[in-house]
Amino acid sequence: MSAPPATQIVGDLSGLPDSDSGPRHLVWWGNLGFMLIEGTGFALAIAAALFLWSRAPAWPPPGDAPPALLWSGLLTLGLFASGLPNGWVKRRALAKDAAGVRRGVLAMTVIGLALLAVRGFEIAALTPRWDKDAYGSAIWMLMLLHTSHILTDWGDTAVQAAWLYTHSIGDDQFADVEDNCNYWSFVIWAWVPLYAVVYWLPRLG
Amino acid sequence: MTERLAASWADPPGLKGFLFTVDHKRIAGRYIVTAMAMMALAGLLALDMRWQLSLPGMRRMGPQLFNESFALHGSTMLFLVSVPVMEAMALWLVPLMLGQRNMAFPRLSAFSYWLYLGGVLMLWVPHALGITPDLGWFEYPPLSGPGYSPGHRADIWAQMITFTEVAALAASVNVSVTILKLRPPGMTLPRMPLFLWAMLVASLMTIFALPAVMLATSMLIADRLVGTQFFAPAAGGDVLLFQHMFWFFGHPEVYIIFVPAVGFVSTIVETFCRRPVFGYPAMVLSILAIGTLAFGLWVHHMFAVGLPRLGNDFYTAASMTIALPAGLQIFCWIATIAGGRVRLALPMLWVLAFIVTFVIGGLTGVMTAAAPLDLQLTDTYFVVAHFHYVLVGGAIFPLLGAFTYWYPKATGRMLGERLGRLAFAAIVGGFNLGFFPMHILGLWGMPRRVYTYGPEMGWGPLNLLATFGSTVAVGGGLLFVANALWSLWRGLPAGANPWGAATLEWATASPPPAPSFAMVPVVDSLTPLWPGDAPLRVMTGLRDDRRELLVTSVVEALPLYRQKSPGPSAWPLVAALAVSVLFLGSIFTPWALIWGAVPVAVALTFWFWPHRPRARHGPLAARR
Amino acid sequence: PAGDQAASVFRLFGLMLLVCGLFYGAVLTLLGWSLARGGRAVAEPWLRRGLWSWGGLIIAGLLVLLTGSVLVERDLAGARARETLVVKVTGHQWWWRIAYRDPASGRWFETANELHLPAGRTSRLDLGTADVIHSLWIPTLSGKMDLIPGRANALDVTPRVPGIYRGQCAEFCGAQHAHMGLAVVVEPPARFAAWLAAQAAPAQAPADPVARRGAQVVTQGACAACHLVRGTAATGRAGPDLTHVASRQSLAAGLLPMGRGALQGWIGQPQALKPGTMMPAVPLDAADLNAAAHYLETLR
Ligand code: HEA
Ligand code: HEA
Ligand code: CUA
Ligand SMILES: [Cu+2]
């Protein structure tokens, strides 16, 4: 039997701040963790598509046209263009500029909505159907995976905008905005390999 | 400990507190109890199976019931027992070992448990209704595809996996961030207990491995529900794609179960040999090596599918390489015993049983790793023997050792030693008696997953022996549980540190109060409680009128800031319910993904809605 | 082992057992020795030296095992394909379709659930499946190879010792995976050739009235929808070829020893003997059942 050990006080933490930003913040790491999970998911989905591609005599199979470039091109351009305002919002968050962050997040909500609309047209133009052959299944899987990420991040941004406009903003909220911007960058960069596999792999011949 | 601190961390009384708690100790406790109940169920199921196999031509079960039994046994043991129980141990121990008051994301812990419970119900409620998956713990298409598995058995299996894997992913992010960012001042990475290294690596492995199985099972459901053609060769699909994706997860999975056990063993060995584990750097490197190598050898589960020989050689080499880190670990533990003064208390006995049993399993693993030899051994009882030796000997024995070791900390009472030793002898003896003959059965040609066999095979006597041994082992398991319950009531009071152990969880009372620690401990060695009778050094300054945690830097563990920590909340439970509805619905209609997402979004919005005063400027400012 | 492939794997197993046994012995010895020291702690430098030597030993052990494994792998892959006999084996839930080429006519013909191989010669088994994944395993001759939809696999076997061996499906394939057995008959080449010629011939004509009645039942009734009896009107392909069914050792993929009683029982109630089997019970009155069994019994 023993009691807890005697203690000797060697310091005081009450002077520490009660928030921080970037990798010093706890939530930044949580965000990173979920991006790792999803990034792994993307990578594996791409690997699965490449596996099917490597087994297929022709990709796309005879009778299927390669996916159309118009809407996807627009989306790709738009997605990359949105990186600029996204970066700006992140810098505003790091500078703890409440007014800038409010306007920026609202703008990103609008931009996200526009991109979702483009994505809608892109998907409407996607052929063949997912149930025609494995090729169709693969491109639909990749597209839906990415779309669900645009959608969730857009929802997050919209809720954040609503909150920011109605409440007073503290350090933790700046950190949240920063994390959301990081996540959007992740959505942008994740599109690069997906775009290549969905739209350019079938054109390799 | 001040009243105010205790009040800030207290849960509301009654049912509300039960449902809304975010206390890692309570959540982990129910996680462990649920997993143990599952282990008991699946263990009894195994006995039923053994009964059917005990004699040739037994008529206890028909093929359908037997197939359901091993599918349920394997799926439960791996998805609902082994992986969750290891996470639960991390959930309980990691903050305590860090001298912290809670996990990094308390509500995520609660969410993880509720989803895990959803997975449990997902498998066992349909079982009660007679819709049991019947294709094993991995269900290869096309057998599990739309053509050969009508009905919903395969969907239930696949969606049960989604539940438990989302739960496991949530727990892993939580555990790894807690270990990386909530270490006490002074606990730099090189001063981190081996247990925390093990849990960190297991969590990171989870993050990289589990998406594979979620993707594979989602593709399977899509093939079954909306007619995608991923695994349909006639339309350009490939059935082996499923196997690759499953084992890309499945192999790391077994180390996700084993690596935490390495953590338990290291901790117990350290305490009962009264010295730090010999070869700390070698141990850490071994854990890291196992964690990395594990991703490069999934194909050793697929040697018989007819891949190019050269590829097989590569995976043989990669698989065998794992014997190096594993062997070094075994050596370090033995060397710790040799280099210390060993005390053979119950937890230490479990460690010895672990070494003696696990090494057999590891060596048979190396045998199956040789591709040509595996062509003879795969899908026989030799493999069944291998994986029970590593799973039971390599993971369950350390787990039971860990239970006996931390039982006093969790309950404040000592576990009965006599009954404990009896249970120990029955489990270890019975297990070896029951499973060693399976090696021979495998070599004699007995395939796995057969519901019966003819008398002319000559497999009868050894099967009877296997059944007998298993019965003894399961009886020992029941004794173990009985002992735990009895000691809860009559055990000797334990005090804070009954074993004279060196890590921080022993610095607080047993059982730990809601905030666990009154002050933040400061660490300057691997064994902070050991430098004789020197007082434990601590820091003050976390607020006691609200929940706060100390966040430190990743490598050096320098104090950075004080993080507000959320209190009890209904939203994890609501969100888990909403997600469950979505998962369940998506078995029946793809539209569930759309309408099911709405309640999930609402729940998450409430969950993450920050509580701060209304804005006083701008167009939407609060009116005074 | 009764074949080259199984023999070289068996040698590998011996090597494995030896090396692994030595390591297990070493672990037990070290552990026992450490426990028996009663607290006289070994000094740190010695432990460190031990760690290095142990690491070296493991690497050496692994190299031995790896070399052995790769050599055997080479051995198995080594083509010994002089005038190889090719046999097509197709997995079905839960029986084996087996096809040979008749050397006389050059045409492929089928049989089921019994594989005959000439001793002393390498045969190539071309493996395919009609439904799910199965795995062909004849332990005394060779390791397993899976039968996978959409893929072509092959297994080379070189049996040496004539005899009757048991094969088995080794990949879980549904309800009756347990009863997906296979008899493997290894015979001297001359006997094998005679067997092949006999199997290639069409079915015997029924000789007595009961058999004639039975032939009617089998070749003109429901059975004909699924079974082929060469030389008759029965041309179904869903079930095993019955042309020479009575020449086989066993019935329904190793379920029952071949015989009159077994045939009668099987035709009468296949679902009771092999629950889940794809063969339905065809309603027949006792006389027809008897006649059908009698007829099949004559199909040698
Ligand atoms: C906790 C779980 C666990 C652990 C730790 C392991 C550990 C290992 N496993 Fe096992 N394995 C499973 C769980 C586990 N396995 C399961 C569940 C299956 C079956 C899945 C299914 O089909 O249902 C399986 C199946 C399985 C197969 C496929 C068999 C088949 O289906 O045909 C193979 C093949 O290579 C394999 C290999 C190994 C190896 C090489 C190790 C190594 O990590 C072992 C390393 C340890 C040692 C080697 C012992 C200590 C070392 C020494 C004493 C040094 C000296 C040794 C030498 C020089 C050889 N395992
Ligand atoms: C951790 C995982 C785990 C554990 C613990 C066990 C434990 C046991 N297993 Fe199983 N088993 C699997 C994982 C596990 N198994 C898997 C993955 C498969 C493959 C399934 C498939 O093919 O798809 C399998 C398959 C399998 C088969 C092969 C079926 C077949 O191929 O046809 C058999 C047959 O004998 C069997 C038997 C047993 C027995 C008798 C036990 C005994 O229970 C062992 C003795 C018990 C103990 C050592 C534990 C003591 C503790 C308790 C009894 C619990 C009580 C405790 C509390 C309530 C706290 N198991
Ligand atoms: Cu066919 Cu098992
Ligand atoms: Cu493995």
Image (tube, grey):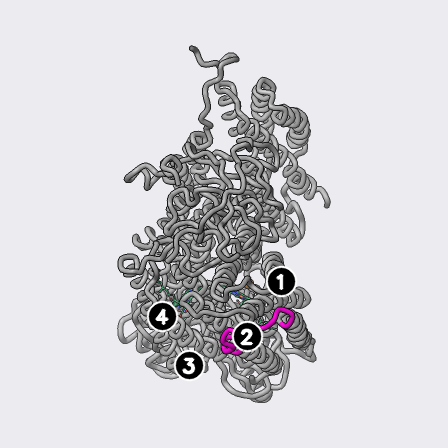
* Residue B457, numbered circle: 3
Could you tell me the amino acid type at mark 1?
Ala
Specify start and end residues of the magenta stretch as a single range. Answer: C32-46
Could you tell me the amino acid type at mark 4?
Arg
Query: Hey, which residue is sitting farthest right in the picture?
Result: A204
Q: Rounded to the nearest whole Å, what is the CA distance between mark 1 and mark 4?
A: 32 Å
Instruction: Find out whether the residues at labels 1 and 4 contact each other: C-beta distance under 8 Å.
Output: no
Q: Who comes first in sequence, dot 3 or dot 4?
A: 4
B561 is higher (above) or lower (below) than B289: above
Q: Who comes first in sequence, dot 4 or dot 2?
A: 2
Q: Who comes first in sequence, dot 1 or dot 2?
A: 1
Ligand 2 within 8 angstroms of badge 4 C-beta: no
Left or right: B90 with respect to B233?
A: left
In front of the other: B100 or C123 = B100
Q: Nearer the viewer, mark 1 or mark 2?
A: 1
Left or right: B597 with respect to C89?
A: left
Task: Have a look at marks 1 and 3 and say if they share a chain.
Answer: yes
Left or right: B575 with respect to B478?
A: right
Q: Position of residue B269 (x, y in %)?
A: 50, 65
